Image (cartoon, rainbow, N blue to C red):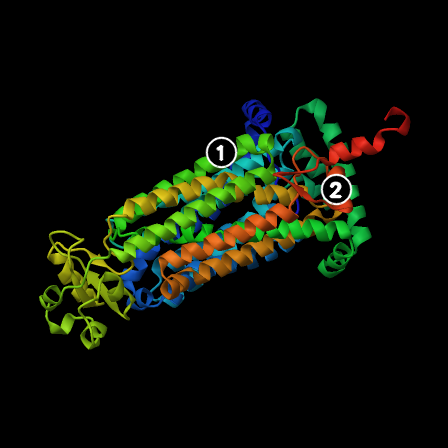
Amino acid sequence: MEGGYHKADKTEFSECWKISWRTPYIMRLSLTAGIGGLLFGYDTGVISGALLYIREEFVEVDKKAWLQETIVSMAVAGAILGAAVGGWISDCFGRKKVLLLADIVFFGGAIVMAVAPAPWVLIIGRILVGLGVGMASMAAPLYISESSPTRIRGALVSSNALLITGGQFLSYLINLAFTKVPGTWRWMLGIAGLPALIQFILMLSLPESPRWLFRQNKIDEAKSILEKIFPADEVENEMKALKDSVEAEKAIEGELGDGFLPKLKSALRSKVVRRALLAGITVQLIQQFVGINTVLYYSPTIVQFAGFASRQTALALSLVTSGLNFVGSIISMGFVDKYGRRKFMLVSLVGIIACLVALGVVFFQAAATAPAVSNLETMHFGGNTTCPAYLSAPKSQPWNCMSCLKAPDCAFCASSGNGLHPGACLAVSNDIRSTCRMEKRTWYTEGCPSKFGFLAVAFLGLYIICYSPGMGSVPWLVNSEIYPLKYRGIGGGIAAVCNWSANLLVSETFLTLTNALGSAWTFILFAGLSFIGFIAIYFVVPETKGLSFEEVEKMLEKGFKPKGIYFKGIKDEINEENVSPSSV
């Protein structure tokens, strides 16, 4: 976070390929550290599929939405703490040691999850992997950026971001691979320890970041590493540049004071930093409040809401959304520098709002056309299997599948001939579920049979396409560009903590919202938050495309007003001020 997020252009990627081909050591450093990004992405995606099977093994998890939310979100809580601790450890003991520690913690967490005999043990495992993810997400970009030639640094750091979405895609493939294996979710979560183990072994043979070594006055060690990265005739220049950079950094630290609170007070006294923080925090909060992590963490469950009760089908369809997220990241890397950050986010939000509203309409229709509950079908399984709420209801005749699922501890067993025909409303238990499935019927606990299911999946995919290139990656880019140099670390850190905290809030409340409001109104709620986000970005977030840090600071000092998709170009204002009266 301290170094910010640097966006690479096409020239940087071609240059990266050439330099890495000549010096494979650079790619070895970057890819090894980039496994941290893979861990981040894998952990984000794997829980969505594993949750389907965890619910089936632990009845209390299936019955309690808050317990499902806690299992999912505790990794986010751990990541917040891990990022904070990882930043301190990386400054004191080095980037490499943080990555090694992250691997140990993540591997331990994966083992704990794989053998968890009860939900509370699973939650402890989730906190541990979250700690590992948080430390790795903090240290990996720093290690890569500090061990890379300047001219290809953006490409290598961007590759780390690609590995995150690649890890998410890999997690869905792993989920699908283990659906037929005894232990299912235990393998899904446990196998996450393998890349952590691989990274740990590979990192043992790699050096510390040369920049960190230089800051610790280990000049000779730093130089020996640079000699492996740069041609011999460039090493002295790089050493001089590194010395100048570290001295400037230490001067800034001396000016701001030692510790977080003095730096924060100094930052908040600056009008420029306050305006930058307003913009930076705004885009980070909106990134989460459009509901993206409800899709990443719960996409198979959402697919079940749409009427696909089969866990394998839900996972396969969720794989499509993960793949689209990966593609969207590549699109962003190719076009955001051409069309601008602000425009990308606003256009992205228009698409997001449209898709969320469409999803709300689809789920409204699905609820309205849900198959009826048949008294004959229900009694077919015997009186002891019937949903208690259905038996005690004064008017049971108008009940449908949605009424059944809203009742406590009840499930819908679809008709054997056609899932859209009237079915049975039964009590939730493993034995009754098995009886339902033995008759070639489908057991529904999250959503109802619907002819609109494929529409919901299509709009879910379109939502990802709209989100990923814009609101997915641009907020991190804006935060790397909008703060004055000496406040970039603390500004980016505050904004990142806001992002993680909003992530935690959304992931901890999604299932509760769907139970309280229904799936349709939950997506409408996120559409409303996205609209508020559109207004906020329009009025408080400037365009930083093509501006130097000094020009961004000048723009924030003067203030800005929105004008269409773009703000008035600060370069034009600078040119106007430099025009002499005689030349007008």
Q: Quadrant of residue 336?
A: top right
Image location (x, y in percent) of residue 211: 69, 40
- Whether residue 172 can be seen here: yes
Count of labels in the image: 2
The reply to whether residue 91 is visible in this rendering is no
For residue 131, above or below residue 546: below
As shown in the figure, which amino acid type bears the numbered disc 1? Ile
Horizontal side of residue 174 vs 259, given as left or right = left
Residue extending farthest right: 582
Q: Is 460 positioned to the left or the right of 426 in the image?
A: right
Are there few (<14), some (14-19), or many (20+) residues within 10 Å of tag 1? Answer: some
Residue where numbered disc 1 is placed: 330
- Above or below 248: residue 298: below
- Mark nearer the viewer, 2 or 1: 2
Spatial distance from mark 2 to mark 1, Cα to Cα? Answer: 30 Å
Please say if 427 is above or below 460: below
Front position in the image: 301 or 366: 366
Q: Nearer the viewer, residue 357 or 168?
A: 357
